[in-house]
Image (cartoon, rainbow, N blue to C red):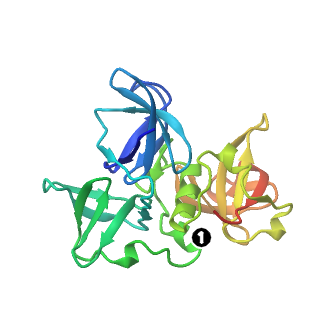
Amino acid sequence: MDTFVCCNVFVPLRSGPSHRSEMLSQVLFGEKYRIIDHVGHWYRIETLFDNYRGWIDTDHLQHSAAGQDDTGQVLNRSLPCHREDGTRMVLEAGCEVYDPDFEKGSFRAGNCTFSAAPDFNQSYLKASGSLADTALKFINSPYIWGGRIPSGIDCSGFVQLVYKIQGIKIPRDSRQQAEAGISISFLQETLPGDLLLFDDESGKINHVGMLLSRGLVIHASGRVRIDIIDAQGIYKKEKKGYSHKLRTIRRITGE
């Protein structure tokens, strides 16, 4: 089965072959996928990064054939660049580039070459600091259901992005993330970077955040924000009450 790489900043990944269908996620620049079905001008695909399936509109699609052994390097911040036709685009944190050439100021995605901003260097691709340090870079990013980039991101997309920049793959959805890694029994045993999962009244996982430091959680709820966390859940000072009920804690141990 042929493998392709996304050459747009992102492409919406929908639940069905229609613009009215829910946006489940996004395929980011440089991420690979396989086409598994098609209906009219819609492709059903599976992403290679997190094995997520959904529908993309070919009108939004700018892609290129990808080599099986190509490995992308993840951007840790936004990067202005130009296509081969001279048009400008701005990649966001979480996008992937291939074969970066810092002397020429270029990189590749599939069989397309892009020219980068003059200051393009290794620092764009190197994770600096801890998971908590990375998470703090995206404070106040707006919440968008299905989003995976700083300009619009959901709760599970936020923690997935933080881990991706640090070189660690975790699943896309909070319910999947609730099964990842190892279980931590008590909040007192947590470490910065641990995932905090929350459930609704029926017991279904419906939210995820990341422990920032003792007693503080960083999560996407309206925007990426920091709130108080205790054994009961997330306490929002401005509402003088709890917004999410803590269900389980997971520690991600590696890729």
Question: Farthest top residue?
Answer: 40
Say above or below: 216 vs 43. below
Quarter of the figure with residue 86: bottom left
Quadrant where the C terminus is found in the figure: bottom right
Q: Nearer the viewer, residue 172 or 108?
A: 108
Residue at horizontal 68 percent and vertical 71 percent from the top: 192
Query: Is 113 left, or right, of 215 in this rendering?
Result: left
Residue at horizontal 86 percent and vertical 60 percent from the top: 185
Residue at horizontal 27 percent and vertical 53 percent from the top: 111
Quarter of the figure with residue 105: bottom left
Residue at horizontal 39 percent and vertical 53 percent from the top: 67
Instruction: Where is residue 243? Give x, y as percent.
Output: 68, 48
Query: Is 120 left, or right, of 158 in this rendering?
Result: left
Instruction: Where is residue 8? Give x, y as percent.
Output: 31, 48
- SS class, disc 1: helix
Quadrant where the N terminus is found in the figure: top left
Identity of the amino acid at label 1? Leu
Say above or below: 183 vs 1. below
Query: Is 26 left, or right, of 255 in this rendering?
Result: left
Question: Farthest left residue?
Answer: 86
Instruction: Where is residue 43? Give x, y as percent.
Output: 40, 30
Say above or below: 13 vs 232. above
10 Å crowding of disc 1: few (<14), some (14-19), many (20+): many
Instruction: Where is residue 88? Give x, y as percent.
Output: 19, 57
Give the labeled residue for mark 1. Answer: 131
